[in-house]
Amino acid sequence: MDNRDYSISVVVPFFNEESSVSELHSRLSAVLKSTGRPYEMVLVNDGSRDATGDRLAELVAADAGAKVVELSGNWGQTAALAAGFANAAGDVIIAMDGDLQHAPEEIPLFLRKIEEGYDIVSGQRQGRRESLLLRRLPSAAANWLIATVSGVRLHDFGTTFKAYRREVLDRICLYGDFHRFVPALAKPLHARVIEIPISAPARASGASNYGIRRAFTVFFDMLRIRFLMSFLSRPLHFFGSAGFLLIGLGAAMGVFLVYEKYVLKLAVMTERGPFMMTAIFLLLAGMQMLSIGFLGEMMTRLYHETRPGSLYVVKEIKGQGLKG
């Protein structure tokens, strides 16, 4: 992709946000037209139970540059974004929330960094007016943990407001809550990542579901991310190393038991019973770890050969999308 000759797709997931659809579309249209580039808005209705679907249908009927992806139910933000990415045609894909907490007017700041050669541009929210105990502290702890484990030095992984080159997103499989970890998942691809300050307007309506409990889940997410970053294509390296360590310990204990039995003439069955059982356990556990590693290699091969199916179901797509 030429850094100065590209098309733009803006992907926005919606869930019960009928009150923000019209204003967001109006502001997005003004900003995207001002860029002078081909653009589209890919608006994903993630099973909204209010009138969001109706508002989006009215919008796409009036704007040929908008495309609505209707999901069959509420699949979650990561799945909604993945559906939007899969149906986006632009060279640069910008993701943002549909609740007006991201300012469309800041999109040119992201595009400027893309033009400078960066592959991912991530927003860092400034002046957040949220609860210190329930929101900002858990968020800061989660961001520190993600940065430490992944080695990607960002301060705000949680915001959806990011810009990506298409070739980066095409090589990343999203599921679970992985949308916030795309910069970390892109590290093995040697993607150039930069963070820029963005505003943090107060939520116009609704309530956030992020809090202390959600922050704890980041720990388990990071274990998954760390494994995927280091051992996804070579699971035998992880399980095999652990397996050989256990087998080595068990074998060393076994040699010691043989020495005691045949050199020192001890009755190891009666005098070293627990020690012998531990040695047997370590040997068996090590062989199991090796077996898991080989199974992981087989599953990895199947994954790369067949590719997994999508974690969402598209009910309907309305509108044409990209236009000049």
Image (spheres, grey):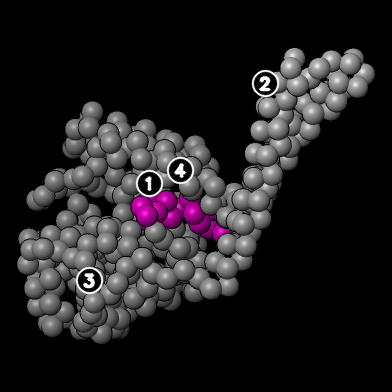
Of callouts 3 and 4, the N-terminal one: 3
Give residue 300's quadrant in the image: bottom right
Residue 311, image x, y percentages: 36, 65
Front-most of residues 75 and 44: 75
**Residue bearing the label numbered 3:** 72
Residue at numbered disc 4: 222
User: In this image, 122 relative to 23: left or right?
Assistant: right
Q: Quadrant of residue 14?
A: bottom left
- Secondary element at tag 2: helix
- Work out whether mark 4 precedes mark 1 in sequence or the reverse, and give the earlier one: 1
Residue at 68% from the left image edge and 27% from the top image edge: 277
Q: Amino acid at mark 1?
A: Phe
Please name the residue that numbered disc 1 is placed on: 157
| Mark nearer the N terminus (3 vs 1) | 3
Looking at the picture, how far across and down is residue 67, in whole percent? 23, 78
Whether pointer 3 and pointer 1 mark residues with C-beta atoms closer than 8 Å, the reply is: no
The residue wearing badge 2 is: 274
Q: Tag 4's secondary structure?
A: helix
Is disc 4 surrounded by few (<14), some (14 to 19) or many (20+) residues within 10 Å?
Answer: many
Q: Establish if 278 lies above or below 144.
A: above
What is the number of the mark on residue 141? none
Instruction: Count up the numbered dots.
Output: 4
- In the rendered structure, which segment of residues is drawn in magenta? 176-191
Residue 85 position, x and y percent, is: 36, 69
Disc 3 residue type (three-letter)? Ser
Badge 2 vs badge 4, beta-carbon distance below 8 Å: no
Look at 50% across and 71% down and name the residue there: 307
Is tag 3's residue or tag 2's residue first in the polypeptide sequence? 3
Residue 316 vertical placement versus 297 (above, below): below
